[in-house]
Image (spheres, rainbow, N blue to C red):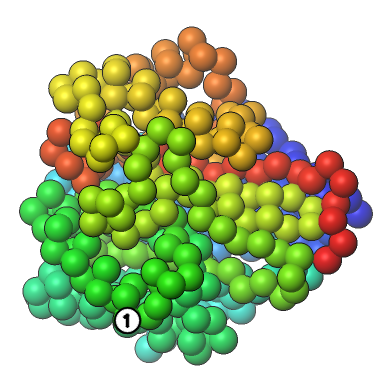
Amino acid sequence: MQARIEKSEGDAAVFTLALPSRAEHVITARNSDAGEMNRILLREASARKARTLTRFVFAGRSHYGAFRRMCPDAEGCVVWLQGDACRGGEVSCMQSFTVSGTAVSPVTRNGHLLGFVYEDGDARWCRLAGVTPSDPHASREEQTREVFGILDDALQEHGFLFTDTVRTWFYLDRLLEWYKEFNTVRTAFFTEKGVFEKMVPASTGIGAGTPSGAALTCDLLAVQPKHGGVRIRSVPSPLQCPAQEYRSSFSRAVEMEFPTHRSLIISGTASIAPDGKTLHTGDHARQIALTMEVVDALLRSRGMDWGDVSRGIAYFTDMADRAIYAHYCGEHGIPPFPLAIAHADICRDDLLFEIEVDAVKLSVSPRPA
């Protein structure tokens, strides 16, 4: 079977990458109540005989109890994003990542589900989600160090190294109060594990809380190639400087090249100038426009465009800006893709919008493994 891409719209946006040995599906449901969105995700996964590994729910704190009552059958790791920036309390959307056609093994710690390991002919994959510290009353730095320790232990237990990590997501409660301290801990951990000597992963760091009140929660994707035909590399941004230049330890993007396709993982991107400073302070429309231009340049630098985007999350400090984003996409012919919407704080108080996307391009002539 040749690799292929399938897309569908409706009450759910679904992107499917079907490979010879497995398939992965991103499903996003929006503009409905929590129970209905949960039913949509279950329906779409069932139709594809797929196993849900992670589910992101974007909502306010007051909805958590109702969500758990309405969705007792929520499969996989549920990552609930909330916090001070979610004062409206609305459930804005849900997004799930599912796989089919391959065996999936759970990753657990003290009886708690942390994620899953699966594989295909090209690589082994480890997805961890909703990883939180055990003591929400410890200092923020101590909680951060513990989370990195949990991630590292889980990876090692399943035969991975932390340097196999290609993507991280960090959701920090009250992020604007301590993002600098978080970066200090992350940089120290990356130095200890030799990350800077290999490849710094792509990442998103935004402000959102968890029901436990912990300082942070983390998701992670690690990939371990099985042969030399798999190439994983960081990708520079044509319009922005490396984030390490302003002491934030992540790559602008990471590309994974397989015999059948290439996957581009673009980090959380905002209105930042080539010198690392914020541009268009206070101007919502111009910040959104510049951010989209930066992402567009990254896509085009790898021979891709918005039609190749498979998944995304847009983070707004003001949910009214969704209309500005929609207008921009309409004006520039950006086609629909599975996009989740979150009301969140961005890593600087003068940044108003951030977006992360993944893109996939099939190989014209598949390379031999």
Number of dots carrying numbers: 1
Name the side, left or right, on which 16 lies relative to 346.
right
Instruction: From the top left corner, tell me how far across and down residue 290 is, in percent.
Output: 36, 24
> Where on the picture, by quarter, is residue 287?
top left
Q: Is residue 180 visible?
A: yes
Please name the amino acid that badge 1 sits on: Glu
Q: Quadrant of the C terminus?
A: bottom right
Name the side, left or right, on which 5 lies relative to 313.
right
In percent of the image, x 13 and y 69: which residue is there? 140
Q: For label 1, count other residues whose C-alpha is less than 10 Å away and answer few (under 14), some (14-19) or many (20+).
A: few
> Where on the picture, by quarter, is residue 301?
top right
Instruction: From the top left corner, tell me how far across and down residue 242 is, in percent.
Output: 36, 48
For this rendering, which residue is in front, 20 or 257? 257
Whether residue 179 is situated above or below residue 163 in the rendered picture: above
Indicate the secondary structure of the residue bearing disc 1: helix
Residue located farthest toward the right when viewing the structure as drawn: 1
> Where on the picture, by quarter, is residue 72?
bottom left
For this rendering, which residue is in front, 34 or 366? 366
Whether residue 161 is situated above or below residue 181 in the rendered picture: below
In percent of the image, x 78 and y 70: which residue is there? 121
Instruction: From the top left corner, tell me how far across and down residue 333 is, in percent.
Output: 56, 15
Q: Which residue is the site of mark 1?
A: 192
In percent of the image, x 76 and y 65: which residue is there? 229
Name the side, left or right, on which 60 lies relative to 29.
left
